[in-house]
Image: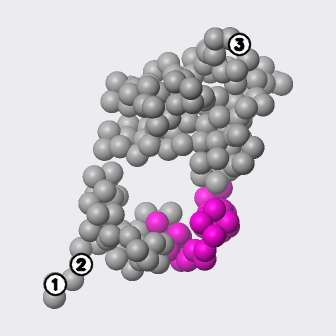
């Protein structure tokens, strides 16, 4: 997602886990600080083989390079999120503190405000809160978030990712 300033983040959900990267073009860790571009030392160290294809994925690259100042990942069934052993001095940063506010705030209101601005339509707070709480996905929740979504396709993908889906009542 791009915030309009050139800074952005992207999330890949995969049956193997989740890969998340962000890019703050003004921070110390920008790959553009040197030529040829290079990641901040340690940025991708420890990335597990099951998710290691994401930095090479053209969908995540700009001019054939993963523009990233921060990367985090979590393999399926891992107890915690992981990142490379990156270190900064007191005046350096990777931009994560503000890039991921939408993800780390934890309130439905923050996401609703973002989504209504981005998609230019009303977003149901209750449906967002339901998903954020981990409540099993229902047809009603999916329809509230995206009236044209194919529930069967969304449910299939949610199950692949390990998200609970409420079974439809027999009828």
Between 104 and 160, the one lying in front of the other is 160
Q: Is residue 11 left or right of residue 152?
A: right
C-alpha distance separating marks 3 and 2: 55 Å
Mark seen at residue 34: 3
- Pick whichever of labels 3 and 2 is earlier in the sequence: 3
Reading the image, the residue beneath label 1 is 170
User: For residue 130: magenta?
Assistant: yes
The magenta span reads 105-131
Q: Is residue 171 above or below residue 2?
A: below
* Residue at x-position 60% and y-position 77%: 122
User: For residue 122: magenta?
Assistant: yes
C-alpha distance separating marks 2 and 1: 6 Å
Q: Is residue 149 above or below residue 10?
A: below
Helix, strand or loop for disc 3: loop
- Magenta-drawn stretch, dominant element (helix, strand or loop): helix
Q: How many callouts does the rendering have?
A: 3
Q: Is residue 52 above or below residue 132?
A: above
What is the quadrant of the C terminus in the image?
A: bottom left
Residue 141 coordinates in the image, percent (x, y): 42, 75
Residue furthest left as drawn: 171
């Amino acid at each position: 997602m791009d915030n309009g300033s050139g800074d952005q983040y992207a999330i890949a959900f995969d049956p193997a886990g989740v890969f998340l990267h962000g890019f703050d073009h003004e921070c110390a860790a920008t790959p553009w600080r040197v030529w040829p571009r290079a990641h901040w030392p340690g940025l991708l160290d420890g990335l597990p083989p099951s998710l290691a294809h994401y930095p090479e994925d053209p969908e995540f690259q700009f001019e054939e390079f993963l523009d990233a100042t921060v990367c985090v990942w979590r393999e399926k069934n891992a107890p915690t999120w992981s990142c490379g052993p990156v270190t900064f001095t007191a005046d350096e940063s990777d931009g994560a503190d503000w890039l991921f506010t939408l993800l780390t705030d934890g309130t439905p209101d923050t996401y609703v405000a973002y989504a209504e601005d981005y998609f230019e339509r009303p977003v149901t707070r209750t449906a967002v809160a339901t998903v954020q709480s981990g409540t099993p996905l229902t047809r009603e929740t999916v329809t509230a978030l995206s009236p044209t979504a194919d529930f069967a396709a969304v449910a299939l993908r949610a199950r692949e990712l390990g998200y609970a889906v409420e079974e439809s009542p027999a009828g």
